[in-house]
Image (cartoon, helix red, strand yellow):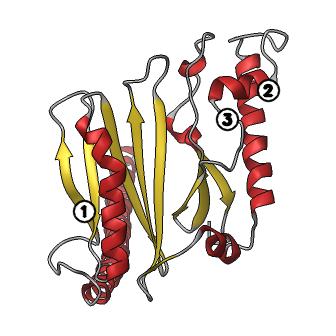
Amino acid sequence: MFEIEENKNKKSNQTIKRKNKRRIDINTKRTLIISGTLFLIVFLIIYFYQKKQENNYSKIKLEKNNYLVYTKYQKKNSNYKIFVPFINLKGDVIEKVNEDIDLFTNEFIADKRCTVLYEYDISGIILSVIVKAIDYNTEYAPETYFRSYNINLNTLEVISNESLLDFFDTNLSTVEELIDNQFKMYYQDIVSDGYFHQNECNYNCFLSYRGIDDYLKNVVYYVKEGNLVAYEPFITYSIYGEEDYFEDEDFEILIVETEKN
């Protein structure tokens, strides 16, 4: 009798396990279906949004089948890479912008030990392009140069720095203060990391090695993912070897972060 009851229990347990397994399989399938459906919806939204944007941009493009900004000239067969952008928009103003890009990059292209790179970002009606050049031909330390262009996609006009700052509800005094704070942070970090003692090189000494005597003299502005950032060129090398501390991102200083971010 006990054996029969035990067998019944075993069969009952096996049936419960099979049912639970089926439930798990069904739940897993449902989860996968829901996840797949959500992914598809998001993908379609992004696809149609990009398609719509491309259609909008096609009306203002100079070359319909090319990107809004593309690489016009490149050289990748050395340690010093060259990527020169072309802004693919109609109009005399944009033509002059592309001419200015060529003037800015030509001298670096002619030298064998220079790097030229670029980035671009579209935030609403603003197309922002930044060209970065590093000159390694200098006697003491590599020097960095930036040139940026902020373009209103509705009017195809270049946005002046003053108008850009107004658009982000800020001003030069705030920009100067934020850059000063950022470099003071760099200085404190470098002292804390032991590159030198503050008695060896105070903050003014630190700025002197950076080649900075005016925070605003060579600053350029770039709109990145809706945020306003300033690019401040400076020298990363000195006798103290703190170039190991600095990274490419340190040239970029956040000025205004928008609410959506």
Report the Cα–Cα distance between label 3 and label 1. Answer: 33 Å
Q: Secondary structure at mark 2?
A: helix
Residue, x 56% and y 40% (percent of image)?
233
Q: Secondary structure at mark 1?
A: strand
Determine the image quadrant of residue 180. Answer: top right
Q: Which residue is mark 2?
A: 204
Which sits in the foreground, 62 or 21? 62
Residue, x 70% and y 26% (percent of image)?
208
Q: Amino acid at mark 3?
A: Ile
Residue, x 60% and y 64% (percent of image)?
227
Q: Which residue is mark 1?
A: 70
Q: Amino acid at mark 1?
A: Tyr
Q: Horizontal placement of 54 versus 152: left or right?
A: left
Answer with mark 1 or mark 2, whichever residue precedes in sequence: 1
* Percent of width and height locating residue 20: 39, 61
* Percent of width and height locating residue 14: 33, 54
Residue, x 31% and y 65% (percent of image)?
98
- The reply to whether discs 3 and 1 touch (Cβ–Cβ < 8 Å) is no
Image quadrant occupied by the C terminus: bottom right
Report the Cα–Cα distance between label 1 and label 2. Answer: 41 Å
Q: Residues within 10 Å of mark 2 (few under 14, many from 20)?
A: few
Which sits in the foreground, 193 or 183? 183
Q: Amino acid at mark 2?
A: Asn
Answer with mark 3 or mark 2, whichever residue precedes in sequence: 2
Report the Cα–Cα distance between label 3 and label 2. Answer: 9 Å
Per the rendering, the mark at residue 212 is 3
Classify 6 as above or below 90.
above
Q: Horizontal placement of 240 versus 24: left or right?
A: right
* Percent of width and height locating residue 37: 32, 77
Q: Residues within 10 Å of mark 3 (few under 14, many from 20)?
A: some
Which sits in the foreground, 194 or 174? 174
Classify 185 as above or below 15.
above
